[in-house]
Image: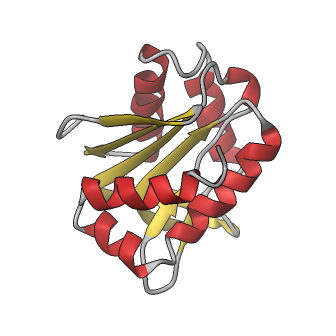
Amino acid sequence: MVKCAVYEEKYGEISVLIGTFQFNSAEEALKRLSDTLFKKGYVSEGYAHVLIEREKEYPTGLEVPGYVTVALPHAHIRYTLKPVLLIGLLETPIEFGKMDSPSEKVMAEVIVLLALKDLEKSSALLKRITSLFSREDFVIAVKNKDFVAIREIVRSTLVHLV
């Protein structure tokens, strides 16, 4: 369930969506966030299914010690129609499998969905976005759900890639 309006802005060829959400499970989150991207024309039909199945096989929950826990689910680039980065700030953390230890679980506070058409750019952007979660200013903005600060930090990160 969307708790507030989803903020949307475009940086070069990449659109960025930021919103605050409430979900009961990882599967519900991935389905509903995927549906949002599908309705806005960013991903093709079937994206949600592939995303959910990939998350089951290769979990993406990541604990950044002392900072925040994030899930970084993604699907194959063939499902991307227009490049997009979605940052979902969760009202209540939800359980995801841990990236480096799939049998363990983490409570994700943020979901970052990245759908790009270029595999090389996708990998570079994923590294940049992941590194944001070890920046104190970004983590404070995320925890405070400060859209303005998040937008500014993301913009400065993307400007080097687009």
Q: Position of residue 33 (x, y in %)?
A: 42, 33
Quadrant assignment, res 13: top right
Residue 156, placed above or below residue 3? below
Front position in the image: 23 or 122: 122
The residue at the point 72 percent across, 29 percent down is 117
Front position in the image: 49 or 132: 132
Front position in the image: 38 or 101: 38
Residue 145 visible? The answer is: yes
Q: Quadrant of the N terminus?
A: top left
Q: Position of residue 86 (x, y in %)?
A: 46, 41
Residue 95 visible? The answer is: no
Residue 10, placed above or below residue 113? above
The residue at the point 71 percent across, 51 percent down is 58
Residue 61, placed above or below residue 86? below
Q: Position of residue 130 (x, y in %)?
A: 59, 64
The residue at the point 59 percent across, 36 percent down is 52
Tell which residue pokes out farthest to the left in this image: 4
Q: Quadrant of the C terminus?
A: top right
Tell which residue pokes out farthest to the bottom in this image: 66
Quadrant assignment, res 47: top right
> In the picture provided, is 133 more to the left or to the right than 124?
left
Q: Position of residue 50 (x, y in %)?
A: 66, 29
The residue at the point 49 percent across, 67 percent down is 106
